[in-house]
Image (cartoon, rainbow, N blue to C red):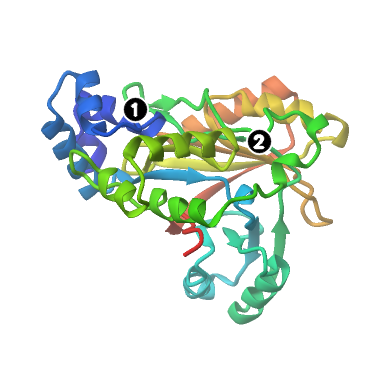
Amino acid sequence: MPAQSEMDLTDRQLLNIIQSAFPLVEEPYLDIGNQLEISEAEVIERTKRLKKTNVVRQISAIFDTRRLGYKTTLVAMRFPPEILDRSAKVINQHPGVSHNYARNGNFNLWFTLAVPPYESLEETIEDMASRTGAEAHRMMSTIRFFKIGVNFDMVKSVGAAYEYYSPDEYNSSNGDDWNKAEPITDFEIQAIRELQGDLSLIPRPFDDMSKRLDMTAQELFDLAASFKDRGIMRRFSAVLHHRKAGFKANAMAVWKVPPERSEEVGRIMASSPWVTHCYERPTFPDWPYSHFSMVHATTKKGCQDAIKEISEATGIDEYMLLYSTREYKKTRVRYFA
């Protein structure tokens, strides 16, 4: 049976808690149990089941790639249909590829790529295109970063990205500060390696982590708070498998926005609770779409309704919906591995 049909109300309430703000305390599952009025053991067992059915992918820190000094971009490629699957598997082998989807449209493969500071994005993409036989490729780097905030109301089955990360709440007067690496120490790198791992489903999951770092659990929580204050860490939370959680449709809406309205329109798009990601990216002679907004919903019609609302709110009616037709890869970049 579909995973979402097996979830009861308590499961859904649990998912709302752990995907929004997982408690950074010594006994987090006890804390969650107190919120739900169930036992710690039941929280752990429910979370185990939700992971076993792949509703929950991982519970860990979510870091900002650029703040850690990594270079990252969205990449679009076009392949003949008969070699698309094979080419996607080759691209998946790169450790910096975290998301990789087949989509409808002129470019049929879209993936995100991150490389360390000493590597070149451009050279890596050119090598990938050459080795896979891509007919065309485009590097869709970020010009403006308006929003990232993946959050769903699992009880009501609606988008709930009200609180989100925007590097400077998008304030263009801050220039490119959002794109600058934050200096980090060797010890902080060790802590990042620990915090990015999938959290154990035991009563005191942070004890072994803090022990390996030779610090107390509270000192680890304080360090995580400082990471968040410095923009290094966006949050510590669960990441859901959207389709397994019931949000079966996702559309990447690409919009043709006049340059003089770029920031205004981006802000409006980011304010929608259905939009989980919103960026301005470069245009090309064969690609006039500057703004990208990702929408997830339980049905394709839900995506279409959300996009229609955004179109009416912005007055932008030149857009295209790119639906994912296959997920080749979705994971997190492992930093300093």
- Checking the image for residue 167, the label placed there is 2
**Where residue 3 sits: x, y (%)?**
24, 42
Residue at the spot x=35%, y=50% of the render?
214
Q: Where is residue 79 in the image (x, y as percent from the top left)?
A: 60, 70
Q: Nearer the viewer, residue 152 or 30?
A: 30
Where is mark 1, residue-wise? Answer: 16
Q: Where is residue 281 in the image (x, y as percent from the top left)?
A: 74, 47
247 versus 8 height, above or below: below
The image quarter containing residue 311 is: top right
* Residue visible at 33% across and 39% down in the picture: 217
Are the residues tagged 2 and 1 within 8 Å (C-beta)? no
Q: For this view, does 39 lie left or right of residue 174?
A: left
Q: Which residue is drawn at 54% across and 63% down?
A: 96
> Which image quadrant is residue 173 in?
top right
Between 46 and 5, which is closer to the camera in this rendering?
46
SS for callout 2: loop
Residue 135 in view of the camera? no
Marks 2/1: CA–CA distance = 24 Å
**Which sits earlier in the primary sequence, circle 2 or circle 1?**
1
The correct choice, above or below, for 56 with respect to 103 in the image is above
Residue 210: give x, y in percent of width and height: 33, 47
- Where residue 203 is drawn, which disc sits there? none
- Is residue 22 shown to the viewer in this render? yes
